[in-house]
Structure formats: C-alpha cells, structure tokens
Image: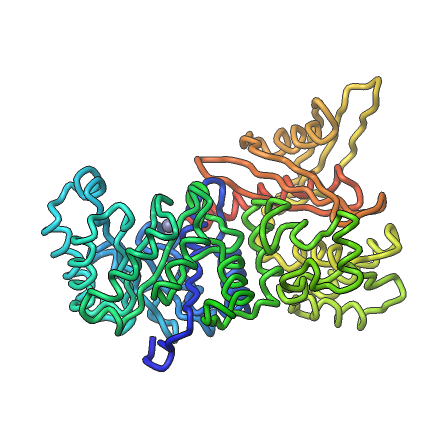
C-alpha cells in the first residue's frame, strides 16, 4: 500500500469473506462462485480482498490465482503461515495481480504457543521475523497477524509487533481470534501498541474480531477509535463459529456516526445489499431477518406510531435510508409487453452483464414466467438471472418429471435425467412429493448424497409468487449448495437438487 493511501482518516476495509467465512461450517464455494463474489467485492470498492489460503489445497490455490488475474481494483491478499512453502505458494498464486499482499500469521498467546505450536516464545518470534523478511523480499505489501492477540501477554505482544515492523511488515493485525475481547479493553490494547511500539505510527494496525460475544462490530469500532486503521470483516458477518465483524455494520457505523468518529471508508455503500444477497445465495446461508443493515426487517416499520412518524418525516425513525445501502422498494418492473430491450435494460440496472446468447435464453424464460405471473418484480428477475448466469458444468439435466400425491395416495415420482448421451429414468416413493422426486433422482443417477438441509421460500409476496428452493447436500465431508426457482415448488425443489448434484460433480472434477 502506497504512502498516499495511508491517509490519517481512511479506514482500510479488508474483506475476508472468501477466506475466513469460506472456512466456516457449511460454507463452501466453487472457484467460479469465488470469482463472482470477488468481482462484486471490487464493485463494493473494498480496499483488500483476502482471496484464500493458497497452500491449503489445489482448489484454494486456483481460486486465489484466478481472482488475482481477473479482479481489478482491490489489493488481493493470500494467507500463509510463517513457513516458507506457504509464503511461496501465496506469492505464486498472487503474482499476476496488479497489487498483492502476503498475509502471514502465527499464534502469540501462551495457550496457543504451548499446546498448538509447541514452541518457545523466542522461537515463535524468530520464525515470524524470518517469514516477514522473506515475504518482504517478494512483495512490498506484507501483513503480519498475531493470532489470539487478545489472550496474549501485552509485553510479548509489543515485542512481537516491534519485531515484525523492523522485519518489514506494513500492516500488523491484532486479531480477537476467539471473540474474547470487550470494547474498552480491546481499545486500550490497540492504543498501547500505537502509542508505545516504535514505528507503529508508520504502519497500519488492523483489527480482526470474532463475534462469540456479539461484540465483533463494537470491538472493531472501538479499535479504530483507538488508532487502528484497517478493519478485517466479512459480508453478513459470516465466519468461524459465531462469525466475524460484519462489513456492512462496520462501514455504516463509520458512515452514520462520522460526526464523532471522523473516519472514512471508500465503500460504495449502495452495493452493500446486492453483495449481501449474492453471498447469502451462493453460500446457501440465509441472513437472519433482524440482522442490522441487510436483514429483511432492517428497514421495515410496523408499529403505528413509527409508521405515522415516518410518513410525516423519514428522519423520525430512520438513521439511514434503505437506498443508501442499496435496498430499493419492490416495484413492478416488467410484463409480457416490456419487450426484449426493456428486459435487457432492467437486467443491466440490476447488475447482470450477459452475453447475447445468455440474454436470449434468459428472455425466453422471462416470457414463460410473465405468462404464469402477470407482474414480474426485481426479485423475480434476480432469482431467474442468478440461475441463468451461473458458470457451472451441468453433468445432469432434468429432462422430464411426473409427480403424484394426494391425501389418499402414497406420493410417487418418475424422473428422466440426462447425463451427456445417457438417459437415466427411474421411479420412487417418498414421504411427500419432493422426497419422492429426490429419491427417484438418486435412483436414476445411482448416488445417495446426504441431504443436509432443504428450504423453500417465496421470492415475492402473493400466491402467484415464484418459489425459491435451496438444497444442501453432503458428500465426502463437503457441503454443496443448489438453487432452483419456479412458480411450481416441486419443480423449484427438483431443480435445486439437480443444481446441488452438479456442484458436487464439478467439485470432483476441479479437485482432480
Ligand atoms: Zn478469523
């Protein structure tokens, strides 16, 4: 990071959705999904994208490499332990990015050094120095993290930070890895480092807070108030265990309370909502309705007094507008007569860039939908287009399905699935029509992945609304998520199941 960017009031937003959140329970993205999210993070204008942990697997390496090659704007970072082979792997994956950062880390708390690293503190420090020096010989942008900093003896933490600065680290991260910190205490820890470690004022001190006590955002804000200048965070607050500090909360707290914090970010806040939806959809992890900033109810007002006040003046109960974070009111967009041009324009406004070929396919699907459903809303289009623009090899295609169920019959399903030239057809029973359809598919493809979770929800209100199904399956210890939309919920469910199976097949090809 150049000197110019280290402005006094600028808070560097370091997004770790693709690293910390991606390693959280149940989250799993394929390479093209990671690239898609990274492009959206660039639109959101984050300063740094932590794209992954290259040495940890070939898929991680390839994902970081593709993001480094394709995504322009943000600095691309890769994680590495204080080990030469990790640093080499990160550097190799990152080298095609315009600007890139090696993020190396080691543990500094007694409990981690004794039980996990099994090294003396002197040895840990020497290895850290060696790693930072080596990383600096490869790139001018090196971040060093003291894992479990909030449970580290402050004297040793100071010593470590000073040694890392002398070795050439340009950002030093003080993570609350286990979510143990509380705002006042964490702020004092940061202030002590900024004030008392020689050279600390010339580099960036960073926060990385976990939400085990629900304090991740509060701790991050307290830390920047005390002198930290980078916040590590994730979209929707996803991450290990209770998650990380949420990007949208930290950014909007800095924006709404600029009066007292007097700090700035470069985030395009109007892209927040779309980014949140994309991450929720691709990771298959819903946002809780009352989640700050991006939850479904975050801008919903119900009580009579509040609604009355809002109608008179929005400021009576609103500290920020929905539009400022990109939440637009559901509005009637298109019908059958809008035409191809109107359809294309609206798609572009919603952020979908498509080739002519995909546009044609999507338009045909739109016409079918507009026949079934007179009013097509933005949400419907987003659901439809998300399906259409997915970059995924379709190993299986659903060719035909017949389901019968009723109060007096045992639900049964017949399906025909295409796998290349192969035609796979089977029938099966089930507890309900969806279960019967899934069983018939399993019989047809001769596989039995474990169904972890299945949900169906309406895309918009009204009885004509499209159903959006999300299916999570588990195979070989990994989770695969599938999506499907249709005005028919059984069809939506089956599409989602086939989509999850295709993700599973694509993963087995990627890992080869
Ligand atoms: Zn973390």
- Rendering coords of residue 236 (x, y %): 53, 52
Which quarter of the rendered picture does the N terminus lie within?
Answer: bottom left
- Rendering coords of residue 31 (x, y %): 48, 55
Rendered residue at 48%/46% (across/down):
28
Q: How many marks?
A: 0
Compared with 315, 495 (above or below) is: above
Q: Nearer the viewer, residue 158 or 47?
A: 158
**Side of 337 where 39 appears, left or right:** left
- Rendering coords of residue 247 (x, y %): 49, 58
Q: How is the image coloured?
A: rainbow
- Name the outermost residue toward the top: 408
**The image quarter in which residue 208 lies:** bottom left
Q: Is residue 91 visible?
A: no
Q: Nearer the viewer, residue 231 or 33?
A: 231
Q: Nearer the viewer, residue 425 or 199?
A: 199
Compared with 57, 350 (above or below) is: below
Q: Is residue 19 visible?
A: yes
Q: Nearer the viewer, residue 117 or 11?
A: 11
Rendered residue at 46%/71% (across/down):
262
- Rendering coords of residue 392 (x, y %): 57, 54
**Side of 37 where 187 appears, left or right:** left
């Amino acid at each position: 990071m150049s000197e110019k960017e280290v402005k006094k009031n600028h808070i560097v937003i370091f997004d770790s959705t693709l690293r910390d959140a991606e390693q959280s329970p149940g989250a799993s993205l394929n390479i093209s999904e990671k690239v898609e999210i990274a492009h959206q993070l660039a639109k959101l204008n984050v300063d740094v994208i932590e794209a992954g942990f290259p040495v940890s697997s070939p898929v991680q390496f390839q994902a970081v490499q593709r993001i480094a090659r394709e995504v322009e704007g943000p600095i691309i970072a890769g994680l590495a332990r204080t080990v030469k082979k990790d640093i080499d792997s990160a550097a190799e994956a990152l080298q095609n990015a315009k600007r890139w950062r090696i993020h190396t880390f080691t543990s500094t708390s007694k409990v981690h050094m004794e039980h996990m690293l099994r090294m003396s503190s002197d040895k840990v420090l020497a290895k850290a120095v060696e790693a930072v020096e080596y990383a600096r010989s490869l790139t001018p942008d090196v971040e060093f993290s003291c894992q479990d900093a909030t449970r580290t003896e402050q004297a040793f933490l100071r010593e470590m930070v000073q040694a890392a600065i002398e070795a050439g680290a340009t950002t030093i991260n003080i993570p609350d890895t286990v979510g143990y910190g509380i705002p006042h205490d964490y702020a004092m820890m940061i202030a002590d480092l900024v004030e008392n470690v020689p050279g600390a004022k010339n580099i960036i001190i960073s926060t990385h807070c976990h939400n085990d006590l629900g304090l991740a955002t509060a701790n991050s804000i307290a830390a920047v108030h005390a002198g930290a200048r980078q916040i590590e965070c994730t979209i929707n607050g996803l991450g290990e265990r209770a998650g990380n500090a949420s990007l949208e909360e930290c950014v909007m707290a800095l924006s709404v309370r600029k009066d007292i914090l007097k700090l700035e970010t470069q985030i395009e806040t109007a892209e927040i909502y779309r980014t949140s939806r994309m991450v929720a959809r691709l990771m298959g992890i819903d946002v809780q309705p009352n989640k700050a900033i991006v939850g479904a109810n975050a801008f919903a007002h119900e009580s009579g007094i509040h609604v009355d006040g809002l109608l008179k003046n929005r400021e009576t109960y609103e500290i920020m507008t929905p539009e400022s974070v990109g939440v637009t009111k559901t509005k009637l967009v298109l019908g059958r007569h809008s035409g191809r041009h109107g359809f294309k324009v609206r798609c572009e406004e919603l952020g979908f860039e498509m080739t002519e070929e995909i546009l044609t396919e999507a338009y045909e699907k739109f016409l079918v939908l507009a026949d079934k459903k007179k009013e097509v809303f933005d949400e419907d289009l987003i659901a439809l287009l998300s399906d259409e623009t997915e970059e995924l090899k379709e190993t299986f295609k659903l060719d035909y399905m017949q389901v019968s169920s009723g109060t007096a019959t045992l639900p049964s399903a017949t399906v025909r699935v295409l796998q290349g030239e192969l035609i796979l057809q089977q029938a099966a029973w089930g507890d309900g029509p969806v279960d019967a359809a899934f069983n018939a598919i399993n019989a047809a493809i001769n596989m039995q992945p474990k169904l972890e979770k299945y949900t169906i929800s309406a895309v918009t209100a009204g009885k004509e609304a499209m159903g959006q199904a999300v299916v999570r399956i588990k195979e070989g210890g990994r989770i695969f998520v599938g999506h499907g939309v249709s005005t028919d919920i059984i069809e939506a469910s089956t599409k989602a199941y086939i989509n999850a199976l295709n993700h599973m097949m694509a993963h087995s090809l990627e890992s080869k």
